[in-house]
Image (cartoon, rainbow, N blue to C red):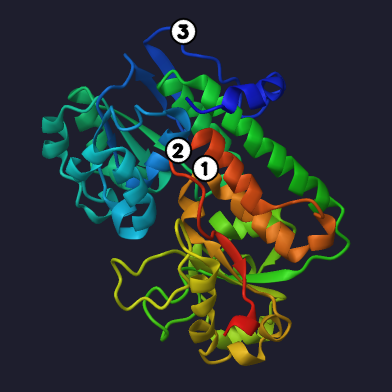
């Protein structure tokens, strides 16, 4: 059993965020999900379907050696997008290889009849799936068959919704202690950067290129508006250029516009996508990735038109940040990296990698190893 409680019991007493996280003393228990729906869970969920495989990041906080005991099917986006983490799970839980796949609801790939035949008692979906799930009648059909659905969110409004989502899952599975302990860690770090941000006299600008190089070197520059890593940048005291330019959650900003904005920092969101995307030319970040290998991947991305004249390039303010943080409750680590990179003097003792290592030690299956946030060092070209 992981050692989260001894380390955090003193702080649990002061847990005030996201409402109470008391244990569900007995079932049935009625919860409010992230679409503000009231859902009654009749018994401890024992047959769970994950509409996004990357929901397993959050469930890993709640469960230990029994993490996959109740998962009966999932979408295989974890395998396609975070192969290193999948292989880590596969090493600990070989049964993962045999999990049936469910399709993506927003693409019409989710087979309702198959889900009913699986006999699930709980379906967990992201809030992005709500409109299609509601309009298609999926929620009512599954409920009639005995499968309740709850919605969580770690991406659209991460700072507000991550603690709520963890507390919700803790209540649904009657695991309030690990959920509460994680939320204490989350809130402590959020409060720390919020205090520093409030005292900033001026704010630097940042452009975060989403999945830079995932389709090769011909594409630039997808980014986030006021959502996900865009909101994390703002929380870290930065002006997110995507928030200023994009009307929606995400989109493409052409390089000519990026050059006009000329951000103080330029950040590639990055992961080890090469196993499933042979044309990818991204910076590989994640478990088992050495800094040396990651550093080698920066120059091709910086050889694209326009990068040589960016102030961020000339000033050595080019970074890579682990993309999968955006799909997980560990998104606060992204804010820590961004804050440290932008205002190092304001955070003399902050080590984001050490904070991520702490999360692994106390909440996660995988051992902390690899590279998750880096500054480009041209001397290693």
Q: Quadrant of the C terminus?
A: bottom right
Residue named by callout 2: 58
Q: Is residue 65 left or right of residue 117?
A: right
Residue occupying image coordinates x 69% and y 77%: 263
For the question of whether residue 369 can be seen, the reply is yes
Mark 3 is surrounded, within 10 Å at the Cα level, by few (under 14), some (14 to 19) or many (20 or more) other residues, namely few
Spatial distance from mark 1 to mark 2, Cα to Cα? 6 Å
Residue 329, labelled with which disc?
1
Of residue 69 and residue 236, the one placed in the foreground of this image is 69
Local secondary structure at mark 1: helix
Find residue 306 and report its horizontal and vertical position in percent: 58, 91
Q: Residue at 67% across / 70% down in the picture?
A: 206
- Which residue is at a point 48% across and 46% down the rendered structure image? 328
Residue 149 x %, y %: 32, 31
- Say whether disc 3 or disc 1 marks the residue closer to the N-terminus: 3
Q: In which quarter of the image is residue 73?
A: top left
Up-down: is 10 above or below 276? above
Depth-wise, is mark 3 or mark 2 nearer the camera?
2
Question: Residue 198's x, y, as percent?
Answer: 83, 51
Instruction: Tell me where residue 78 appears, x and y as whole percent.
Output: 33, 51
Check disc 3 and report the residue beneath it. 25
Circle 2 Cα neighbour tier, 10 Å, few/some/many (<14 / 14–19 / ≥20): many
* Corner quadrant of residue 70: top left
Element at label 2:
helix
């Amino acid at each position: 059993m992981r050692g989260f409680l001894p380390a955090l019991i003193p702080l649990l007493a002061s847990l005030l965020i996201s409402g109470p996280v008391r244990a569900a003393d007995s079932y049935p228990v009625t919860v409010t999900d992230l679409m503000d729906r009231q859902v009654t869970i009749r018994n401890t969920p024992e047959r769970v379907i994950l509409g996004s495989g990357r929901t397993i990041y959050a469930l890993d906080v709640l469960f230990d050696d029994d993490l996959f005991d109740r998962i009966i099917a999932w979408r295989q986006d974890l395998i396609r997008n975070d192969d290193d983490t999948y292989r880590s799970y596969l090493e600990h839980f070989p049964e993962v290889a045999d999990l049936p796949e469910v399709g993506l609801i927003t693409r019409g790939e989710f087979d309702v009849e198959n889900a009913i035949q699986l006999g699930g008692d709980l379906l967990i979906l992201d809030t992005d799936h709500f409109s299609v799930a509601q309009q298609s009648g999926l929620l009512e059909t599954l409920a009639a068959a005995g499968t309740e659905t709850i919605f969580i969110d770690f991406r659209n409004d991460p700072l507000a919704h991550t603690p709520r989502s963890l507390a919700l899952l803790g209540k649904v599975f009657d695991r309030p202690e690990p959920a509460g302990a994680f939320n204490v860690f989350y809130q402590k770090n959020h409060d720390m950067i919020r205090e520093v941000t409030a005292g900033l006299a001026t704010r630097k600008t940042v452009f975060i290129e989403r999945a830079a190089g995932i389709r090769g070197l011909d594409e630039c520059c997808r980014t986030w508006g006021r959502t996900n890593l865009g909101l994390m940048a703002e929380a870290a005291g930065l002006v997110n250029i995507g928030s200023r330019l994009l009307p929606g959650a995400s989109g493409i900003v052409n390089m000519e516009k990026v050059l006009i904005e000329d951000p103080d920092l330029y950040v590639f969101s990055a992961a080890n996508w090469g196993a499933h995307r042979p044309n990818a030319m991204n910076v590989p970040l994640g478990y088992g990735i050495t800094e040396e290998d990651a550093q080698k991947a920066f120059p091709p991305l910086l050889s694209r038109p326009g990068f040589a004249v960016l102030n961020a390039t000339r000033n050595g303010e080019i970074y890579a940040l682990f993309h999968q943080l955006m799909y997980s409750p560990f998104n606060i680590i992204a804010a820590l990296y961004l804050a440290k990179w932008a205002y190092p003097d304001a955070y003399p003792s902050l080590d984001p990698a050490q904070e991520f290592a702490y999360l692994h030690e106390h909440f996660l299956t995988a051992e902390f190893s690899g590279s998750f946030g880096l500054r480009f060092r041209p001397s290693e070209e």
